[in-house]
Amino acid sequence: MFFLGKKNGVIDLIMKTTARENSYANHPVLLQAILDAFHSGIHIFHAIRNEKKEIIDFEFVLLSKNSVAFGNAPQLGGRLLFAEFPEYRQELEALKLVVETGVSRTHEEHYQKNGMDRWFLVSDSKFGDGFVNVWEDITEHKQAEEKIRELNRSLLVNNRELASLNSELKTFNSIAATDYTDTLRKLYTNLEFIIFNEAKRLSDEGKANVRRAQSAIQKMKLLTEDIVAYSRIHTHDTDLEQVDLVHLLNNIQDDMRRIWPGIEIKMDCEDNMPHIQGYPFLLSLLFHHLIDNAVKFRKENSHPVVRVACEPSAESNHPSAIPGTRYNIYTIMDEGIGFDAQHADDIFLIFHRLHPKGAYKGSGIGLAICRKIMDIHGGFIVAESGEGKGASFHCYFPEQ
């Protein structure tokens, strides 16, 4: 539409210039100046008819200096199109229709002559007893189209690869959730059977080795369950809801008391925090992991204190933020042992640990799950801390 509009603008200008005398022959200098002012190749033709008034050829009337289709433009005035360029004779019937019916035609032309390789949108429109021919360079437009096609092809290949990987992951999940877990359970049970029935025949070292093997199996089972849970995050909810965070946190606090018996957990959250449009189960899982971390990494001989606050409607310069998007920022703060600020990004990597294995319970997958849940909700999560200074986790949810 852009090119047609521009071409029609050229024709309209020519028509207005020649309307007074109704003959472009009376305005050759003015018309030539108008044509040369445009970057398009513009050519005006007059129909040549036989004694039966049938069009048999077209005479060159005026050509712009930017003419591409016809070389030696200044010398072509008054000459015949088909005599000078016989290859265009095949266009006779189409051009006759333009002149006789007044219906314009447009087509794309790939021009590969005289060392030139360009694309043009060619338009023919009735003008007097002839037509105006406009060649508009659309090479950049065609190149952009080709880049888009190439990107689409690349995207298609990547999507197929992703679909293949997803299929493999589903297969692994199925195996891990059933056969693999069942195998681990049988191994543990068989070792327990050996301990119970063969204890008298085993040395103390042998019994210790069996117990260590059982402990390793238990860890493998927990790790397998965490991996399966991580990979299934997308499948837990189907409908978005307006989630009351205060109500959700009260439920999590009750859960924490059952998970950490004997530990007094103090939670302080703001009233009237804006609701979050999201998936209830995943949001519960998100804040469960963050609060569980606050309890797990509390300072020695102290009771965990967790504060939850919200800073509404703000823009962020964080690299993960979408430009022009406003976020509600929900912050979970604790007074625990904290961590070195240089690890603020690493802690969200799956299986990443800041502490030696065995120092704290867990597989190192909790914060990776938190990041994935924030991705699903179109937001992101940022951690701030310092050793011995507690930790703050800022959850950026797009404002609805």
Image: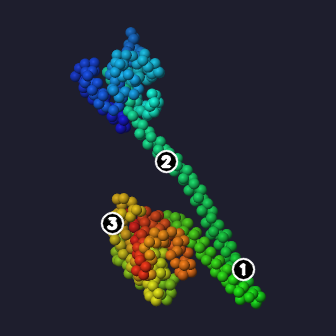
Mark 2 — residue? 151
Q: Amino acid at mark 1?
A: Asn
Mark with earlier residue (1, 3)? 1
* Quadrant showing the C terminus: bottom left
Examine the rendering and report whether any part of residue 248 can be seen.
no
Gap in angstroms between the C-alphas marked 1 and 3: 58 Å
Asked if residue 30 is positioned above or below residue 273 in the image, the reply reads above
Q: Is residue 102 above or below residue 271?
A: above
- Can you give x and y, in whole percent of width and height, for residue 265 in the image? 44, 85
- Foreground tag (3 vs 2): 2
User: 205 or 377, which lies in front?
Assistant: 205
User: In terms of sequence position, does the residue under pointer 3 or pointer 2 come before the other?
Assistant: 2
Assign a secondary structure to mark 1: helix
> Which mark is nearer the camera, 2 or 1?
2
- Pinpoint residue 229: horizontal percent, then vertical percent: 56, 70
Q: Is residue 87 visible?
A: yes
Residue under the image location 46 percent in, 69 percent down: 345
For the residues labelled 2 and 1, the Cα–Cα distance comes to 55 Å
Number of the label disc, if any, that sits on residue 314: 3
Q: Residues within 10 Å of mark 3 (few under 14, many from 20)?
A: few
Residue on which disc 1 sits: 190
* Residue at left offset 35%, top offset 19%: 75
- Could you say which quadrant of the image residue 26 lies in? top left
